[in-house]
Image: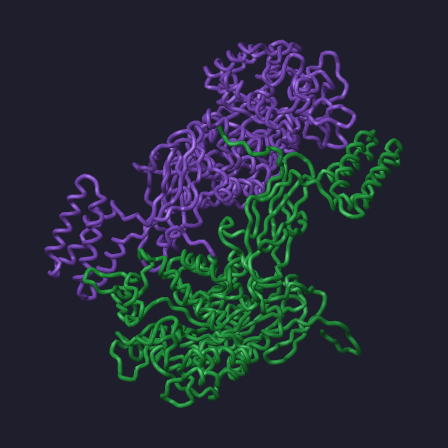
Chain colours: A green, B purple
């Protein structure tokens, strides 16, 4: 026998609820103060009117609701705002709107001159029902209506009384929901603090912060850099792993297999006799120095992000204390990392297929816990796609349950499904393919996918023009101009972006060899000593761009990106706007690092709240120049050697006086 | 604490499985012999190779499997064929392919000249593991390989031996699946007999089948029509309700509210003192006559479809015996049907919100059961969208559990979400918006939606150019030519279609009044007497078209429809092809009923298995003319007054001899 429902009288159907990621298996993401717009197809059999609402609640608090309004074709939309960090649940509820159904029919019957005496009795029953549900003065109000309708029911005017607007509004407040259908799933929103969406990262190797060439830098040395980093407008300072570095198979300069006496090794070869993932490399300082660094950074408006790389040097204490967490080869040795034919004998990967996976998971969670206890609230996770997805899902949700303000950046430089899966299962934000999207078409396609499809519900991009592992061909070939182009793209296409400095602002672009994306004399394997104030540094441009980001709400969100056509393939144009369109930024970038490019941009005026009839001003926040534009087609010319882009704030004309226009 | 999985070592992830309707809430549909092609994104952390397969099973039978092959970007595809009526389940399973991972690494290491002695030992362990899982001779075969590799492991040739193809194939037969991930849902296919997809319906009122004008026709009279109906190539004869017709508020001719003495009433006003939904209108005959009619129809290759309309005349026995199944008004009367300001006092709708809904559901199920017991296997359900969706879901699945060969056609002339919902929840096939899709753009958009989107997984269209309720403006205005156009469109765009006859083949097209889709002197309210062999009847065209449908596999499925461009908006061109492309039909229709239209069709040759280099023949199965075509662009001219369409069978050239081409 097929199963009957517990009650077959529920007539409303709810389907196609959005946003909903993978059938509700995963949460959507928002930051505090953002809105969740919920849509659904809601309908019933027959011709009755229906009504529906969004239900939402946080934790064990009481359920709140927000009414949904009809769109076309049985679709409804409602919304709610998330004001607290943590998790919210939401769902949709729909019911037959009996009073509206009755009222609409009555209206037609009165117009057709029918006898509606019995209809009025039906309406009175509905009002009596609502009166029993009503609170405060409404109960009396509705009972008053019952009396009035009973008195007037045999007069022609009595029927019209039943169509009264005040009565209708009162009835809408107390619908009969005893057979309301609730959507079968509770969906989840993870709400993060604003930095999850809008942040500006600076990656720095503290060991290269020494004022003296050749001496290993310390946290104290790095403290001296904080004013410099803060002055450029960054708000996150991200440190590569700060743990003791292994000695076994240590890599030399430029990743050579032979080391010199004074080679410092890679910070990602974690663990030595001096400790593992919960220890600090002694040459950087001690735990107290680190805590002091965090507090000094905070004084400059900078949060410290730590790199978490779950892999071990052969010298890591785990290798001795927990050989069961590693894969053993038939000859009794521990399996080192490989990408055949390449061998990485300085790295032991953890074996997540170990029978002791539970103790391993617990230990790895304790690594995060340890650094949280030191005051760290942002983690950049190295290569998460080489550890099981189920581990990340558990460890992130377990940590965020206790510390909902902690953020996790996924370094998922892997194929799209895996990159997106990591975002779905809990990573707050993610590295992207931005570094390799260079042409107008590539940028348009990729950022449309990230911001205009379902991906935006769970994936927050964090754009990096360079990293210690990635010196793109574009930067190698295009020189300083290329660094400016990529900086402006990163900072305006993404609400979050970061640079690996000072390599970036100093425009370091020598590759290890032609065709390689590795830096020559990479900082991953040696100390660096740089002149932060050398000629040609981009620090002033970076400061200005980051200042523009802070001043303009439009640049602090990813959901509002829109591309506009240009008639030149080297000119890309896009806009970002605040939800209320009060802050609109139009960006035009010359992607050609060598030649002057000019052409017409074709603005989608409606999308940025403008019309063709009124002139407006575009105020270039980079150069401070102002241009009078009107209509969708406007001319742009950008010359290399000067700024490669306009970051234009749209200013509407507010009045004209004596042939002079004033703009907001 | 966030929940840990029972076992954290499952590394493969399976997502985006298709086909999957509404997160697996509903089944997909197939007919016997069809294939289910399953796709999924399957991937794991890290760089290991993976493998996956489709699992499928029917009822309690053992699970079978079919391997999946990789597409691009971590997507995999597999398929299975459904050979039995009923339900199948399917899902996807994926695992780390340890041997392939090992083998690929070994290959690279050998090429790089590494010492692979320890690697060989690892491989030998894998082979030993497979040997314990192997059946029959394979166990010995694999053990033989273990011995061979052990002997050769220190020789250079020993390593290469491990790359042997035979060994690889044997290992692929016994993968280690102890940590295989199974997709979290079991998905369902409902498999129907072929008629669910491919059927040709003829709707006839038996009461109009009398050979004498003015006498009420009977099942016996209707038997005499069976050869006529069968000769036109139909395989379903569909009867409007055959139950006793109510007297109270009986509607007169043309739906008048006053009746004459001899008015026969509407067959949809069901129930009188003579019985209800399980009785036969005495003027048609008795139950024995009906059973005889079914068997006579079968003798002509015709199945009988019954109309099930769950509504009652005020005279229906239910109204007395089960007043609890109706809504009572405050004045004690039963609520009649309304569409304010219209009243339908001859109809009492059933109240599905009745507290006694369970006894009502049971009774309604028994109506289907009764007619199934008489031998009926096809039901056309009247206005299902005015009864609760949950009722249909239960009653259809409950009946199909016992009678999987029963088919249900949904008369869901309502908004799209409700129409599709009824299909999802179990209706075998559905009426469509075809009757109101007239232009090339409308037809292309609508049939692309039905056949090229997810809709095709659960919604089987049944196309009706007319019904007793629908005489479209196109038919009213376009005359006989319009009937030909709509017949050919219905019969070739849809694998299932039907006509309401003889109104259709006799091209009856007088509306009740201008702007109405009701027939003048509609058969719904009076007896008709017609000359089936009058001049101008389309019966020969219908016979030919239905013959073409029977002869050409391409026209028996909906999934293979593809539109081709033409340079004339009045010429629509589309093709259908069998899966193996051995049967390809190209249809070109002149949608203009008045003017000659000509133009170039632009065939998508690849989609129909042709190339631009070889001429082919198109054989018009309507006119028997043959044309030599080559390349994608070919000229067509269609004149009203003759046939409004080509139904072209593509015939490939098989040889040329003495300047003469032979085609298949």
**Up-down relation of residue A17 to residue A445 (above or below):** above
Q: Nearer the viewer, residue B484 or B72?
A: B72
**Image mark count:** 0
Q: Is residue B563 visible?
A: no
Q: Quadrant of residue A172?
A: top right
> In the shown orientation, is residue A328 left or right of residue A408?
left
The residue at 62%/77% (across/down) is A620
**Dividing the image into 4 quarters, which one contains the C terminus of chain A?**
bottom right
The residue nearer to you, when weighing A367 against B92, is A367
The residue sitting at the bottom extreme is: A212
Q: Position of residue B327 (x, y in %)?
A: 70, 27
In terms of depth relative to the viewer, which is nearer, B380 or B138?
A: B138
Q: Residue at x 21, y 57 (%)?
A: B122
From the viewer's perspective, is A332 left or right of B416?
A: left
Q: Quadrant of residue A583?
A: bottom right
Of residues A85 and A81, the one nearer the viewer is: A85
**Residue drawn at (44%, 65%), measured in percent from left and top?**
A410
Percent coordinates x, y for residue A329 in the rendering: 22, 61
Report the side of B631 relative to B96 (left or right): right
State the image coordinates of residue A495 (x, y, percent, origin top left): 55, 68
Q: Residue at x 56, y 29 (%)?
A: B484
Q: Is residue A138 visible?
A: yes
Q: Position of residue A293 (x, y in %)?
A: 48, 80
């Amino acid at each position: 026998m097929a199963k009957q429902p517990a009650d077959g009288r529920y007539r409303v159907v709810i389907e196609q609820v959005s946003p909903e990621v993978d059938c509700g298996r995963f949460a959507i993401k928002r930051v505090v103060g953002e809105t969740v717009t919920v849509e659904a197809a809601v309908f019933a059999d027959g011709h009755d009117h229906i009504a529906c609402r969004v239900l939402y609640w946080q934790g064990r608090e009481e359920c709140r609701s927000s009414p949904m309004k009809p769109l076309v074709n049985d679709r409804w939309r409602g919304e709610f705002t998330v004001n607290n960090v943590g998790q919210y649940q939401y769902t949709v509820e729909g019911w037959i709107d009996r009073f509206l159904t009755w009222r609409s029919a009555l209206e037609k019957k009165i117009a057709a001159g029918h006898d509606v005496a019995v209809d009025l009795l039906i309406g009175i029953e509905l009002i009596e029902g609502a009166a029993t549900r009503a609170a405060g003065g409404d109960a009396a109000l509705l009972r008053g209506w019952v009396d009035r309708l009973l008195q007037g029911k045999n007069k022609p005017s009595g029927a019209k009384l039943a169509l009264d607007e005040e009565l209708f509004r009162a009835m809408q407040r107390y619908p009969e929901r005893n057979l309301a259908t609730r959507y079968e799933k509770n969906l989840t929103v993870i709400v993060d603090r604003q930095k999850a969406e809008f942040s500006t990262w600076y990656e720095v190797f503290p060991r290269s912060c020494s004022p003296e060439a050749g001496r290993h830098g310390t946290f104290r040395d790095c403290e001296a850099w904080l004013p410099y980093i803060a002055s450029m407008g960054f708000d996150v300072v991200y440190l590569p792993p700060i743990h003791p570095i292994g000695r076994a198979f240590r890599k030399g300069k430029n990743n050579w297999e032979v080391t010199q006496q004074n080679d410092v090794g890679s910070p990602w070869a974690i663990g030595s006799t001096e400790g593992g993932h919960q220890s600090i490399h002694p040459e950087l300082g001690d735990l107290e120095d680190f805590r002091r660094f965090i507090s000094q950074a905070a004084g400059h408006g900078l949060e410290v992000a730590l790199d978490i790389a779950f892999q071990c040097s052969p010298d890591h204490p785990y290798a001795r204390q927990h050989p069961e967490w590693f894969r053993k080869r038939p000859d009794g040795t521990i399996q080192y990392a490989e990408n055949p034919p390449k061998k990485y004998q300085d790295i032991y990967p953890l074996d997540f297929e170990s029978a002791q996976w539970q103790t391993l998971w617990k230990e790895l969670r304790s690594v995060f816990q340890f650094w949280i206890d030191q005051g760290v609230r942002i983690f950049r996770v190295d290569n998460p796609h080489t550890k099981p997805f189920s581990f990340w899902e558990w460890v992130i949700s377990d940590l965020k349950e206790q510390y909902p303000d902690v953020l996790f950046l996924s370094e998922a430089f892997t194929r799209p499904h895996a990159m997106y899966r990591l975002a779905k299962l809990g990573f707050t934000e993610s590295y992207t393919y931005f570094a390799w999207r260079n042409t107008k078409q590539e940028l348009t396609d990729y950022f449309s996918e990230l911001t205009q499809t379902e991906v935006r519900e769970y994936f927050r991009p964090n754009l990096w023009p360079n990293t210690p592992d990635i010196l793109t061909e574009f930067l190698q070939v295009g020189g300083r101009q290329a660094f400016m182009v990529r900086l402006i793209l990163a900072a305006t296409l993404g609400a979050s972006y970061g640079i690996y400095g000072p390599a970036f602002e100093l425009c370091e672009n020598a590759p290890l060899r032609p065709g390689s994306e590795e830096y020559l004399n990479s900082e991953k394997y040696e100390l660096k000593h740089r002149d932060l104030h050398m000629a040609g540094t981009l620090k002033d441009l970076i400061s200005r761009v980051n200042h523009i980001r802070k001043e303009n709400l439009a640049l602090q969100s990813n959901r509002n990106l829109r591309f506009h056509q240009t008639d030149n393939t080297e000119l890309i144009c896009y806009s970002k706007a605040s939800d209320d369109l009060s802050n609109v930024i139009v960006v035009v970038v010359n992607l050609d690092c060598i030649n002057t490019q000019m052409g017409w941009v074709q603005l989608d005026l409606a999308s940025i709240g403008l019309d063709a009839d009124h002139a407006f001003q575009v105020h270039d926040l980079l150069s401070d120049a102002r241009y009078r534009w009107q209509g969708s087609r406007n001319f742009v010319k950008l010359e290399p050697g000067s700024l490669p882009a306009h970051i234009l704030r749209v200013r509407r004309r507010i009045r004209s006086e004596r042939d002079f226009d004033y703009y907001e």
